[in-house]
Image (cartoon, grey):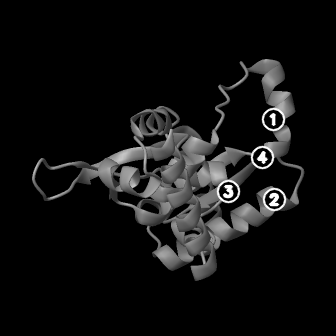
Amino acid sequence: MERKKAEAVMEAILFTMGDSVEIARLAETIEKDVKETKEILKDMKQRYDGEDRGITLVELEDSVQLCTKPEMYEYLIKVAKTPKKFVLTDTLLETLSIIAYKQPVTRLEIEKIRGVSCDHAINRLIEFNLITEVGRLDAPGRPLLFGTTEEFLRSFGVKSLDELPELNAVQMEEFKQQAEAEVQLQLDI
């Protein structure tokens, strides 16, 4: 398939699907290898970003999605309903951070790290589509395992979990001391 036709086919697929599509599936569809498909997508993204266009391509791990540019939001809300905004409290952010860095992780492991129940936080994060059930641990009771979603990557503007900032040993020790102090405060009450 010639390059222009391949671009048009991928653009049509990404527009119609709305969600992300695996690059390997796109490559198979346009009868190109993954490397060449990535090059075509890179060129498409540069054109979308370089021109006065309202869309862009967003890469999410091994997938790509056609998205509206963030600066177009104010115009979209004039036509569409205002999308539901969610607020991440400190508790939700803390729980989400644990899941992002330790996934797949069980509810019990999260509670052990946080020192408090996390049922509400996990339920809210699932509701916001930032985390999902990714399986079950092969242990007694077969507890659920949780991990982040593509929506998490989109919301935090990262292509993959590898782009999350690394925590150094000093930060980890500070977090541990803060958590222990919070647990002690709760025990004293």
Q: Tell me the crowding category of disc 2: few under 14, some 14 to 19, or many 20 or more residues within 10 angstroms, Cα based.
A: some
- Residue 25 picture quarter: bottom left
At horizontal 85% and vertical 43% (from top left) the residue drawn is: 71
The residues bearing labels 3 and 2 have C-alpha atoms spaced at a distance of 16 Å
Reply above or below: 65 against 189.
Answer: below
Q: Which amino acid lies under the numbered mark 2 shown in the image of this protein? A: Asp
Tell me, for residue 157, which label it has, or none: 3
Type of the residue with mark 3: Gly
Position of 109 compared to 67: left or right? left
- N-terminal-most mark, 2 or 4: 2
Q: Which residue is mark 2?
A: 49
Q: Residue at x 47, y 50 (%)?
A: 149
| Front disc: 1 or 2 | 1
Please name the residue that numbered disc 4 is placed on: 69
Cα separation between marks 4 and 3? 12 Å
x, y percent for residue 101 = 48, 64
- Front one among 163 and 138: 138
Question: Which residue is tagged 1?
Answer: 73
